[in-house]
Image (cartoon, rainbow, N blue to C red):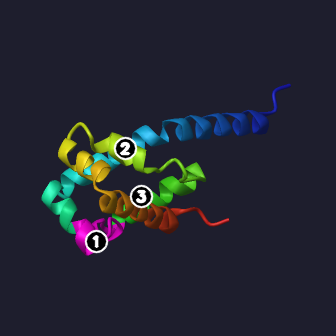
Amino acid sequence: MVNIGKVKEVANNFARGLMLQMAPEIAGGLINELFHQWNMDVAKVAEDVRENNSFWFKMDAEQHEQLRALAEKLGDVDFLTADVVINGIKKDFPGVASLILNWPEAAEWLLLQIADVKARVRPRP
């Protein structure tokens, strides 16, 4: 006899694993969309770096909740890295990607932004 509870558990674990595997690509696409919404360009990123402006405060409350819900569903946000951000924006924002890769202060700023977002959305144990 089939244990429906066990089948659901296996299916949920499989779906979660698949989502985690796809998470970097999905996150890259979401980041690209945010950069479009914010009309990011080299000058804006340079200003954000110099003024230490926050990604988090560029997002609205609905975006915050969507990120928290996604992190809760995935159970992990460690997939969010500088490489994910760069890969997500490099096609549509090559100048911005180049700026971040070639300006140490911008690279450090990006790492701080990622750490801040991860800390704000990380699921609570």
Mark 2 vs 3, N-terminal side = 2
Which residue corresponds to mark 2?
28
* Residue nearer the viewer, 102 or 8: 102
In the image, the segment drawn in magenta is 48-61
Mark closer to the observer (2, 3): 2
User: Residue 35: percent from the left, percent from the top?
Assistant: 24, 53
Q: Is residue 77 magenta?
A: no
Q: Which residue is mark 1?
A: 53
Q: Answer with mark 2 or mark 1, whichever residue precedes in sequence.
A: 2
Q: Amino acid at mark 1?
A: Asn
Q: Is residue 77 left or right of residue 46?
A: right
Residue drawn 41% across the image and 50% down it: 82
Q: Residues within 10 Å of mark 2 (few under 14, many from 20)?
A: many
| Residue type highlighted by circle 3 | Gln
- 30 left or right of 78 in image: left
Q: Position of residue 45 (x, y in %)?
A: 21, 60
74 to 13, vertically: above or below? below
State which tag comes first along the sequence, 1 or 3. Answer: 1
- Per the model, the C-alpha gap separating discs 2 and 3 is 15 Å
Is 31 on the left or on the right of 41, as rendered? Answer: right
The residue carrying mark 3 is: 66
Q: Residue furthest top?
A: 1
